[in-house]
Image (cartoon, coloured by chain):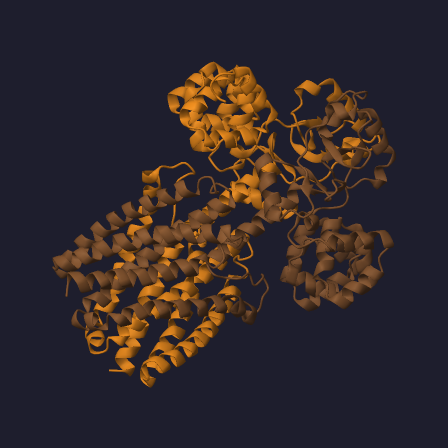
Chain colours: A brown, B orange
Amino acid sequence: IDRGDAERLRELLAALHPADVADLMGFLSSDYRSEVVAHLDPEALAEILSELDTEIREDVLEHVPYATLAKALGEMDSDDAVDVVDDLEDDKRAQVLAAMPEIERTAIESSLAYEDETAGRLMQREVVWAPQFWTVGQTIDHFLKEADELPELFFDVYVVDPSHKPVGAVPVSHLLRTRRDAPLAQVMEAITEIPVQMDQEEVAYIFDKYHLISAPVVEPGGRLVGQITVDDIVGVIQDESEEDILALAGVSDAGRDAGVLGIVRSRLPWLILNLLTATIAVSVIAAFQNEIAKLVTLAILMPIVAGVGGNAGTQTLAVAVRALASRELNASNATRIFLREICVGMIDGAVLGSVMSVAVFLWFHDLRLSLTVGLALIVNVSIAAVVGTLVPLTLDRLGRDPAVSSSVFVTFATDSMGFLSFLGLAAVILL
Amino acid sequence: IDRGDAERLRELLAALHPADVADLMGFLSSDYRSEVVAHLDPEALAEILSELDTEIREDVLEHVPYATLAKALGEMDSDDAVDVVDDLEDDKRAQVLAAMPEIERTAIESSLAYEDETAGRLMQREVVWAPQFWTVGQTIDHFLKEADELPELFFDVYVVDPSHKPVGAVPVSHLLRTRRDAPLAQVMEAITEIPVQMDQEEVAYIFDKYHLISAPVVEPGGRLVGQITVDDIVGVIQDESEEDILALAGVSDAGRDAGVLGIVRSRLPWLILNLLTATIAVSVIAAFQNEIAKLVTLAILMPIVAGVGGNAGTQTLAVAVRALASRELNASNATRIFLREICVGMIDGAVLGSVMSVAVFLWFHDLRLSLTVGLALIVNVSIAAVVGTLVPLTLDRLGRDPAVSSSVFVTFATDSMGFLSFLGLAAVILL
């Protein structure tokens, strides 16, 4: 299909949703992709670019001439355009920006000036506003006259004061159902302003909490500079929770189309760190070599104590990381939740310890061995609860992401304490 | 503050966003809460109820008289009302429904008939529609006349054919910028229909992919019965990713305000299962008792092989679960990704094996021991890659949630294979 008929290809693509075209591009080889891209006009390219995955987009961008790309960027919402420009290599970026009209270039450059993952990067500059002294009727008439200037789609009209500070918002559906002579200032609703420098995770939290559809973004001085809409937030929420899942498992994201080496690079550092901590943890075992030589059963049972402790720690950690992310866990209830986790750990430990005591007695018919395993499990599962809560809380208080590197600490603690508690108790009780 | 002044309390609460009031309620003890609730009128109660966490809401609902609750439910969007009614105990539910007007009761009852976590449950029945032969002007005039009948906020007007099947949608902002004499059929956009029985995870995927703000929900016959808006989707996405994080760590969600026993109940089953699999895994060690008795160093090194393998398995598992959730991993590329993971596992294993070989040689000055550790790590990390990909893929193909119970399988495999590969190789090479 791809070879001959350019006209027909264009028709086919036009009939599809840009997100579906982007999916298709993912399945094509790089050669075919550049073939397809060559047939797209700037408008079609603009729609597809923002849907493509980063790696595929980088590949596509290499085949697009500067002039076409500059035109496509002009067609895009400013937030999507900034995203694309951000991905370009430095020299290509300069050339593309040079090919754009002054106004659009300035807009993109000033957006790029905001830090990554802040409201300033997330926002689009296209925003619909009206002065506070207008009536509903004046506003609607103005929109009809200036229809070409309006964004494709908008949900709120921001009402601004003479210094261009937002003072309220009127949802578009309210404009439709209100009498024409009502002043905007009377029908507008309270707004939640988002400062440009706010972290995107915080922005997502606010959108979720107050069920916002869109919110005005303001400069430090309070002037309206853009807006964030909820569809951008959906992406942020997914990215952040994906980050948490991967970070808890000790993986840096390698991207969908990373090669084998890219993936190795994203995982090996954590595995080497784990190898190091595991080596330190087993040095505890080395200290008890004589005891193990006397009673090999100890070598059989010690991984159980360490492993179950590790699991209990992972549970506590995942719950704490999630609670921190959703702000259910915060300074005001940290102590209460910490104490609750310790109680849970002790009860879990007691149950697991009892079960294992009985099992070990049935297996080895040694009452003191079964007592040792039981006590060690109680100790290690309780320690797991303490560490699994304390590590993410501490990282969070230090301003670090509690999901990253927590599990290394927790596994290290449950491994070494598992070996120490079991072998130490064994040395006291058994030998 | 809570005691004396009812009037002032009501004023204070009215000044706050319902989400903030709900937060405050979370901090109050149950007694104070019922005090506050007693002072709320049905409208205020309606706004707050949908913001409360489940446990707190249950507590609050116990203190609200049937009649007030019935009125409050009438004020709520139908999706929120259904949520609340779903939480009520059976006898209270019947009494509250009986106190509601016929129409609202029927609406709630038929929504409850849809399965949990489907589009039917997620949707609100309040939906704005217009016949396809109307013009933009007719539609706007109709809204002005019937303003009281319209939902508080809406984003799209669904255009329906005579059999009430949706044929397109007009975003409200388009109504504002289009000439009054344009027929709706001409300005409407394509819609993505959501069947009532669609799973909410699938709905969220569609919203994210096509950047939808709202979508019409249709009955099996194709009739428009409601709509889903993106703000409901934000909640779904957070719930689903939270489920994945917790499931991977082996925790069932106990809810924010669960007591110690509730939490124990959510974690203990997984820990007991883990205790069981760990016991089976260490039975591998029992088979090599004699070898360990001869060379205690084996007992020191074997947890490293098992532990690093477990980590590599967790990494692969987390990446696979996430890729399955975002549909980056599917039937069309499963084989390719599986092979890629095996390559990654072998390379990671080779690097880790080499590092550890050198370390062990430096530690114990035993070339054959260092060779054994190195080979065992290569074997176990490769197995981890296979299992970490295959387990979630298989669960997914069986129609099960790939996040739930995967880690139990993977840990079991990497533990037992870690012990087996290391001790087995040791038996062959060393002894």
**Residue B234 image position (x, y, % from top left):** 57, 41
Q: Which residue is drawn at 48% across and 27% down?
A: B84
The quadrant holding residue A280 is bottom left
Residue B87 visible here: no
Q: Is residue A117 left or right of residue B426?
A: right
Q: In this view, does A347 lie to the left or right of B59?
A: left
Q: Is residue A257 left or right of residue B294?
A: right
Q: Residue at x 59, y 23 (%)?
A: B14
Q: Height in image: B392 above or below B303?
A: above
Give the quarter of the figure containing the C terminus of chain A.
Answer: bottom left
Which of B278 and B149 lies nearest the eye of the viewer?
B278
Q: Height in image: B231 above or below A261?
A: above
**Residue B370 image position (x, y, % from top left):** 35, 81
**Residue A369 image position (x, y, % from top left):** 16, 60
Give the quarter of the figure containing the N terminus of chain A.
Answer: bottom right
Q: Height in image: A374 above or below A261?
A: above
**Residue A397 image position (x, y, % from top left):** 50, 50
Q: Residue at x 33, y 63 (%)?
A: A416
Residue B5 visible here: yes
Which of B58 and A56 lies nearest the eye of the viewer?
B58
The quadrant holding residue A366 is bottom left
Q: Height in image: A101 above or below B236?
A: below
Number of marks in picture: 0
Q: Which residue is drawn at 36% across and 60% down?
A: A413
Q: In this view, does B43 lie to the left or right of A96?
A: left
